[in-house]
Image (tube, rainbow, N blue to C red):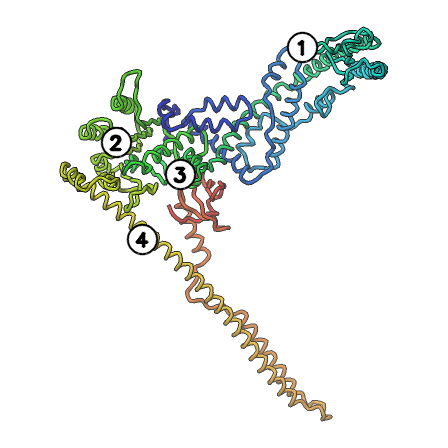
Amino acid sequence: MYLCTVFSTDQQTLHDLEFEAIKAWLEKFCIGPTALKQVQTLQPRTQFAVLRQELKRLDELRLVRVHGEKFPQLEFEELLQEIKLLGIQKAVISLEGFRRIYQASELVNALVLFFENALFKYPLLKELTNDVYYTKEITNEIDQVFDRNGQIKDDASPELADIRTRIRVLRNQINKNFDKELRRYNKDKVLAETLETYVNERRVLTVLSTFKRKVPGNIHGSSKTGSLTFIEPLVNVPLNNELEFLFDDERKEIHRILQALTALMVQYRPLINAYQTLLTRIDFLNAKCKLAIEMQAVLPAIGQHTGMHMKQAYHPLLRRANQQAGKPTFAQELKLQQKSRMLVISGPNAGGKSITLKTIGLLQLMLQAGLLVPVAPDSQMCFFKQIYSDIGDNQSIENELSTYSYRLQRMKFFLGRANAQTLLLLDEFGTGSDPELGAALAEVFFEQMYALQVFGVLTTHYSNIKLKADELPQAQNGCMLFNEKDLSPLYQFALGQPGSSFTFEVAQLNGISKALIQDAKLRLNQQKVRLDKLLSSLQKERNQLLAQNKRLSEAALAAEKSSAQHEQAIQKLQHKQSQVSQVQESSQRQLQAGKKMLGFIEKFNASSRKKDINTALFQELTQYLRLEKSKQTIKKKAPTPTATQQPTKKEVQRAEKYEQERIKVGSQVQLIQTNRIGVVEEMKGKQLTVIFGQARIKVHLEKLRFLAD
């Protein structure tokens, strides 16, 4: 169980596992600066209850997106400046500020309505809206002042309406005067081709400088060459001055209106503050959701005990790079449990050992940072208290440390901190020094880590580490598979046996002569040569068995399909035969009945005048009809014969109850109503959370059928 909520790692581990690249990927989905800052400060954690709730909430939003629900479009700007101004007396929020408040209120109202209509489908997402409520009061107040284009309405106040009326009248007069002067001076040929322009927001004539003294008015400058002079006609000078006074009056009145509206908004400050909190939280959540969808990530089952079983696990950065390059990416299945908590991965270089190790580490960091991970939905993961790595050829120039010295210091650091809730990821374990001496020291370190109960994944070429993993009960070997013919990597991880480094085979493929290779073999310890040869042979046999198993599986599937089709054909034939038999039986019965009735008709005496001559015949006919009716009744009531005695209803219920009692977390179950198969993620009494494909559903125990552990 998790007893500590403090998570520990270091920057080197985050760098080794490329966690910053994931954050950079996440940043591009953020809308506002608050979510962006949250991404930049994002770190792995191990607060089990809180983190688990966050992940479930994120998965709810992912399901909203995947199922195509009409979730409100997240278009908003943050309200930090507006909230600050609402706390200052006589402050004035700008036109843009009120537009942001209006937009936020509309969006929050849409979110509230969405979750009300969704009923109980997304409870953790709906929980985010607890501090807000649906209201049109804020938008109605803003609509009293602003038009649809976000500008102050003319009738926002009587004073503003009067000022703007006067402005329109004055502008009309200025334009009439200007047009009259324009026609006059254009006729006198004193204007340039452009005739007019605007300078300092005033309409002016473009006069040829030679004739500037012929046009009375205010000069507002000249062209760069000095050939043109810009003159405001004298008749418009006082009118334009009056217009400036009116513009100033308009600005003052708008300032007063906005100040009054700001004061009105103060009463809504707690709600507007809640808008900011809700929208920034959803922004951050939505960014993580978009990242999950882009990298095809899901929420695995999360156990409270240390251990993991990743199925169809992908390294997200590698898959993105391969997709851009048009190359395939191979999924891995990786398992670390209490009984097999240390995994040693071996095999030749360039086979995928390091990327497999990095996949485990990066996905674990992502999960503990509250991100969904690219694995199969029925995968199982956990939380670790500490995650540390030693990957790559790290050196410390500043401290004058070699690669080996650096690694020794890292190992000292690990051993001083590691415990049963630590995940260690060590690439090329023990290398950097004399092979024999380094291997001996690596074996000691391995035993020490094993004694500390850590969970670890190590890649190595050392045979003694492979042997040690085989000897220790809670350690296991694994290897990356290669094509035994050309030694090309298959990028497939196989659990259960160590891998050969294929040292001599790779050398031979690269053109090294057999004589040199044979000489090298003679210089080695023969036991090591035999071991490497054995590992190589085992991997070849494994590849052959896998290929044979694949062929057998395909043949079994084909046989099963053929058998099912044959069985279906037999059932159809039997059904047709049954129908034919029923028709024949019915026809025979009707024929016999017809003959019998024909006999009665022949016996009927229609010519005799005796009153009772046909009485005996009628009695015989009545008795015959009663007998036939009795036969049909008995046939309908007769039970359908069965080959074997069927179990009673109580016996069936008793058997199902026994099977249901075997259900636990991780069990494979079947939904009785629809026959859908899923995996149990969580149990609270008789209420279970079950993963069905991409969906998580809460189901009562009685609605499930136990399949397997």
| Residue 136 appearing in the image | yes
Label ID, residue 482: none
Residues packed near mark 4 inside 10 Å, few (<14), some (14 to 19) or many (20 plus): few
Residues packed near mark 3 inside 10 Å, few (<14), some (14 to 19) or many (20 plus): many
Picture coordinates of residue 375, whole percent (x, y): 42, 38
Quote the CA–CA distance across marks 3 and 2.
Answer: 26 Å
Which residue is at the front of the view, 511 or 482? 511
Task: Determine whether the residue tagged by mark 3 lies in a helix, strand or loop.
Answer: strand
Picture coordinates of residue 52, whole percent (x, y): 45, 31
638 with respect to 459 (left or right): right
Instruction: Tell which tag, 4 or 1, sits nearer the viewer.
Output: 4
The amino acid pointed to by label 4 is Gln
Which residue lies under the disc numbered 1?
Answer: 90
Which residue lies under the disc numbered 4?
Answer: 548
Task: Determine whether the residue tagged by mark 4 lies in a helix, strand or loop.
Answer: helix
Which residue lies under the disc numbered 3?
Answer: 313
Mark before the other along the chain sequence, 4 or 1? 1
The amino acid pointed to by label 2 is Tyr
Q: The N terminus is located in which quarter?
A: top left
Are the two marked residues, 3 and 2, in contact with CB atoms closer than 8 angstroms? no
Which residue lies under the disc numbered 2?
Answer: 450
Classify 268 as above or below 466.
above
Classify 649 as above or below 660.
below
The amino acid pointed to by label 1 is Lys
